[in-house]
Image (cartoon, rainbow, N blue to C red):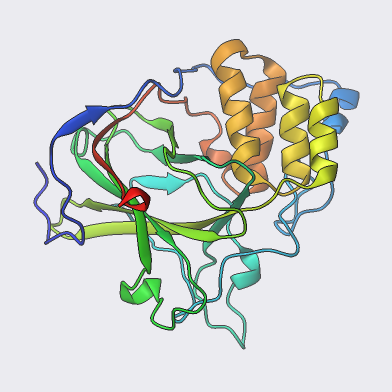
Amino acid sequence: MIARTKPKFNIAASAIGLPALLVLVSGWNVPVRAESEAKALTNTSTPYGEIGLFAPPADRGAPTTVGGATRGEGLCHQVTPLVPKDITKAETDESPTPTPPYFGLTVAAQPTFFWHFKQSALYTGEPIAFVLYEYNPEDAAFNPDAGQYGKEVYETTIEYPGQSGALGFNLPIELEVGKSYLWYLEMGCDDGQSGSTYGWVERIEEPSQLSSQLSAASDALAKTQAYAKSGVWFDALNTLAQERMTADSPSLQDGWTQLLQDIDQSELADTPLIPSLSTETTIDLQAQ
């Protein structure tokens, strides 16, 4: 067990299990495709400088909060959120935010979060606190960098997986349309300190144009493209992951690679999906 400082959260240790969320997919070697097929996955220029599948929303982003809403760095240098950064919050002369915060949109009531875990015998089985907060723009005290997170609506403990890869966690409570939420991860590091990282998710009403595109979509890749073009990150990534679970193919592998390239995480594209996760003591604070 890793020694750690006193955690921010005290989650009891009565263990429960969640159903398997994903299956392990290995050998993600993406073949070179015909030019016409490659063009089908292209979109428009993104703020990251690439012509890709995902187009970040131009009119939405992470809330501007006291302290700059910087993303938490670290989590013991083991875990990377598979989420875009809101580069509109990057450092400028007027805004000294050192690092853009993680931010993504969803139209799902219960979105799925994905993180990449490095393989680590040291951390395997260690508990990771996951906490979700509802953002209230009227709360003047809301300041994540100072440990002031607002109204807590959900918490659970995720067990560090025993292998490297992308792990998905389906939120078991429903988000409200039009609201932003801050998700927070914390775990104990081998230096005795607590590492943490956080980001934002906002649930929006499904645009009518997106609804039409989804209805016309012939397969999961077309649905992924529709979500991605609309800037709806969480649903684009999850749609592709779920399809890879049941019927993987070179085009799906290439779509996954393209999505991660679009958010500057191409180095993580070839790692497998982790088959399941376990949690301890899920607490739905909305019901209390």
Q: In this view, does 31 lie to the left or right of 153?
A: right
Residue drawn at x 81%, y 25% as measured from the top left: 217
Viewer-nearest residue: 235 or 257? 235
In the rendered image, which quarter is residue 166 located in?
A: top left
Residue drawn at x 85%, y 21% as measured from the top left: 34
In the rendered image, which quarter is residue 1 located in?
A: top left
x, y percent for residue 133: 40, 60
In the rendered image, which quarter is residue 160 located in?
A: top left
In the rendered view, tell whether residue 255 sits above or below residue 91: above
Q: How many tags in the picture?
A: 0
In the rendered view, tell whether residue 185 sits above or below residue 18: below
Residue furthest out toward the front: 288
Asked if residue 131 can be seen in this view, the reply is no
x, y percent for residue 282: 27, 40
Residue drawn at x 66%, y 14% as measured from the top left: 249
Viewer-nearest residue: 233 or 258? 233
x, y percent for residue 48: 70, 56
In the rendered view, tell whether residue 194 sits above or below residue 259: below
Viewer-nearest residue: 216 or 196? 216
